Amino acid sequence: MDKPPPPFEQLADLTAGDESIEQAVALTAALTAIPDLQRWLREQRQHVVLTLHERDGISYTDMAPHLGVKPERVSGIARGHSRTPRKKAGDE
């Protein structure tokens, strides 16, 4: 089977060993938690961008090429804005 993308290499442990119901349960739990993971990653990225800007004085313009976005997007990240709409409670 293929390896996971580099940021998620540790998830390969979920597929280690012989196939089992426990493995299927662990994979299901990981899939179900993806929205929580995305939220956490966004929060961590926002924290890092704000810290680099406020503590180190790095401008959004200087950060933008490293993140592969425009300075306006870096500003949005710092404010906690997301480009992808999030589901509201009760939406499915």
Image (cartoon, rainbow, N blue to C red):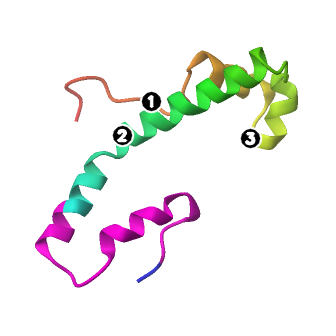
The residue sitting at 19% across, 25% down in the picture is: 90
Q: What is the spatial separation of the Cα atoms under label 1 and label 3, in whole angstroms?
A: 20 Å
Residue range corresponding to the magenta coloring: 3-25
Counting from the top left corner in percent of width and height, residue 58 is at 84, 24
Which of marks 3 and 2 precedes in the sequence? Answer: 2
Q: Secondary structure at mark 2?
A: helix
Q: Which quadrant holds residue 66?
A: top right
Question: Of circles 1 and 3, which is in front?
Answer: 3
Residue 63 in the figure: left or right of residue 16: right
Crowd band around label 2 with a 10 angstrom C-alpha radius: few (<14), some (14–19), many (20+):
few
Q: Secondary structure at mark 3?
A: helix
Q: What is the spatial separation of the Cα atoms under label 2 and label 3, in whole angstroms?
A: 21 Å
Q: Amino acid at mark 2?
A: Pro
Crowd band around label 3 with a 10 angstrom C-alpha radius: few (<14), some (14–19), many (20+):
few
Counting from the top left corner in percent of width and height, residue 89 is at 24, 23
Instruction: Name the residue carrying label 1.
Output: 85
Q: Amino acid at mark 3?
A: Leu
The residue sitting at 15% across, 77% down in the picture is: 20
Instruction: Name the residue carrying label 3.
Output: 67
Quadrant for the C terminus in the image: top left
Residue 21 in the figure: left or right of residue 38: left
Answer whether labels 1 and 3 touch (C-beta < 8 Å): no
Q: In the image, which disc is placed on residue 41? A: none
Q: Single out the residue that lies furthest toward the front.
A: 55
Residue 8 lies in the magenta stretch: yes
